[in-house]
Image (spheres, rainbow, N blue to C red):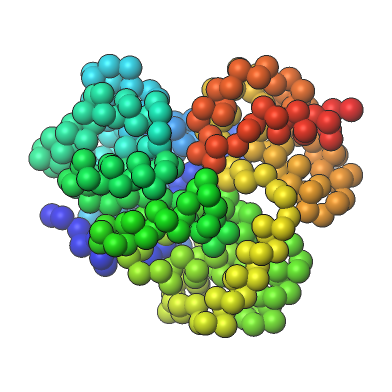
Amino acid sequence: MAIDLTKMPKLGFGLMRLPQKNDEIDLDAVCKMVDMYMAAGLTYFDTAYVYHGGKSEVAARECIVKRYPRDSFTLATKLPGWSIKCAEDRDRIFDEQRARAGVEYFDFYLLHSIEEGYNYEVYEKYDCFGWGMKKKELGQIKHLGFSFHGTPALLEKLLDDHPEVEFVQIQLNYVDWDNPVVASGKLYNILHERGIPMVIMEPVKGGTLANPVPEILEKFNAVRPGASAASWALRFVGSLPGVMTILSGMSNEEQMADNVNTFTNFEPLSDNEREVIKEATEILLGTPTIGCTGCRYCTDGCPMGIKIPDIFSLVNTIRQYKEDWRAKNYYNANIVPAARAADCLGCGQCEGVCPQHLPIIDLLKEASGMFDN
């Protein structure tokens, strides 16, 4: 039975940044988070073939599928265009995903990370939209969509070419609304005008908006004492009409509790709060930080095994807070044993898969200057 996409739970559990223990997903911790989430009446779980090195779908099986009736939750996953080398790969990957997750069907299935270039060309070359519709006819997919990191022009072309698409996942948060690269506001307006339900990713921009500079926290607390910075970011997105579900890649029970609280008796932003968000955006845009969201797409194919998002987080810490000794200590203890920023070969693999289109090679050179000397 088809799901009414206009009546979805507003908070989705993104299985992308799960808690870990000894470099493995901490399944006991995830189970506790799942139980808290489900107890609140929330049901949308989002994973992907590549999350946690392929182990996220397995975690979904162990923590959700095996522990709850199949009709009590909805599960979304994604087809990775970069792993498709021939038409047969579509079924091979899909069958592997069903085995990993322990399900016969996925409620939501997305073509992963469409943007100009390779991924888009692969999905069209191998008719992945038509393939997805056949899976839907077989009952193996309930709703077909795609996640998107491209330009507004490409989004409109895709929607014109593929009216069968039922929903689209985009990056949207208050600081990226007018970002000329991410173009959150323009993408939102295109989808909203066409009446296409939206799944929102990166509402707190990889945690950046959950830990803003003290000046922003003071502004938030003056208007809404005790409310977390993350709740402000989530309420900004949740106040927009046409949003189906907002994904949060929660990593611990505290984050889960805070987010569940935000969406229990949800309060849209007031006009005064919108002004505060505007002020916070101006402050953030005045701080030259690296716009890394920690998706870690860059790390899987790095031949040197460089922990790129972790290094960028340390660079941002120095840029924002001007206190470098903690960052340098962390770098020496946790980054250097694997690979230094200076070990970058400049191969460009990371830049080719970065959804934020960051100049990673140059940024690693900057980081090396901070930490490797």
Task: Name which quarter of the figure residue 190 lies in.
Answer: bottom left
Name which residue lies at 58% across and 59% down: 175
Q: Position of residue 126 (x, y in %)?
A: 24, 24
Q: Quadrant of residue 35?
A: bottom left
Q: How many marks?
A: 0
Indicate the quadrant containing the C terminus: top left, top right, bottom left or bottom right. Answer: top right
Q: Is residue 28 visible?
A: no
In the image: residue 282, left or right of residue 79: right
Residue 362 pos. (x, y %): 70, 30
Residue plotted at (32% across, 37% down): 111
Q: In the figure, is residue 129 to the left or right of 323?
A: left
Q: Nearer the viewer, residue 37 or 229?
A: 229
Q: Nearer the viewer, residue 5 or 286?
A: 286
Q: Residue furthest left?
A: 137
Between residue 238 and residue 361, name the one nearer to us: 361
Whole-percent x, y for residue 279 in the image? 65, 71
Q: Residue at x 48, y 51 (%)?
A: 183
Quadrant of the snapshot with the N terminus: bottom left
Residue under the point 77% across and 33% down: 366
The quadrant where residue 310 appears:
top right
Q: Position of residue 33 (x, y in %)?
A: 49, 56
In the rendered view, would you say 54 is above or below 180?
above
Q: In this picture, is 182 found above or below 214?
A: above
From where the camera sits, is residue 233 visible? yes
Of residue 266 and residue 131, the one placed in the foreground of this image is 131
